[in-house]
Image (cartoon, rainbow, N blue to C red):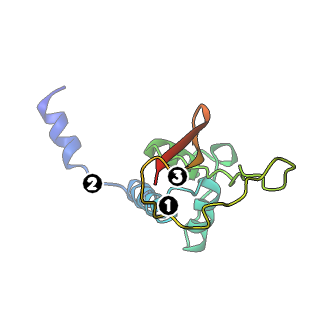
Amino acid sequence: MSSGSYYRWKKQAITARQQLKITIKEQITLIYFAAKQRYGSPRITLELLSIGYKISRPESFARTGEAITVAKYMKQLGLRSKLSKKFKVTTNSNHNYLIVENILNREFVVKMPSKVWVSDITYIQTKEGFVYLTTIMDL
């Protein structure tokens, strides 16, 4: 490439369409991070429509080659919505198993070691599933 071609390219003005694309990409990014990265293209489209942009959501809905689409821009920007998982209850208190009597009666101060031991268990969700963590303490 010749240096003249480079400088001609560098001097060319940004067209109105290019400026609109830049502005819309900035708006998409602002809305995406304002929504804590949870909004996908449907919600971002609604937000853009509510502030006055004429825009369509997915690439397949574009009627002409000039339609501006949120899904396409989000893909170009590398933005994907984070899906939040529904809270899952892991404790079942309604069971017929033996329930041990509370002999400690909230008296957690002990004078000698190895007289009172307490423990607890919790579940930690990982990509592979739940792992269990238990702690055992000598009061």
List the residue tagged with mark 3. Answer: 116
* 85 horizontally vs 113: left or right: right
Mark 3 is on which residue type? Val
Query: On the image, which quarter does residue 102 sit in?
Result: bottom right
**Whole-number angstrom distance, CA of label 1 to CA of label 2:** 35 Å
* 32 horizontally vs 63: left or right: left
Q: Position of residue 111 (x, y in %)?
A: 42, 59
Q: Position of residue 18 (x, y in %)?
A: 39, 53
Instruction: Tell me which residue sits at (13%, 35%) in the image.
Output: 4
Front-most of 132 and 40?
Answer: 132
Q: Residue furthest bottom?
A: 51
Mark 2 is on which residue type? Ala
List the residue tagged with mark 2. Answer: 13
Sequence order check: which comes first, mark 1 or mark 3?
A: 1
List the residue tagged with mark 1. Answer: 36
Marks 1 and 3: which is nearer the front? Answer: 3
Crowding at mark 2 (Cα within 10 Å: few <14, some 14-19, many 20+): few
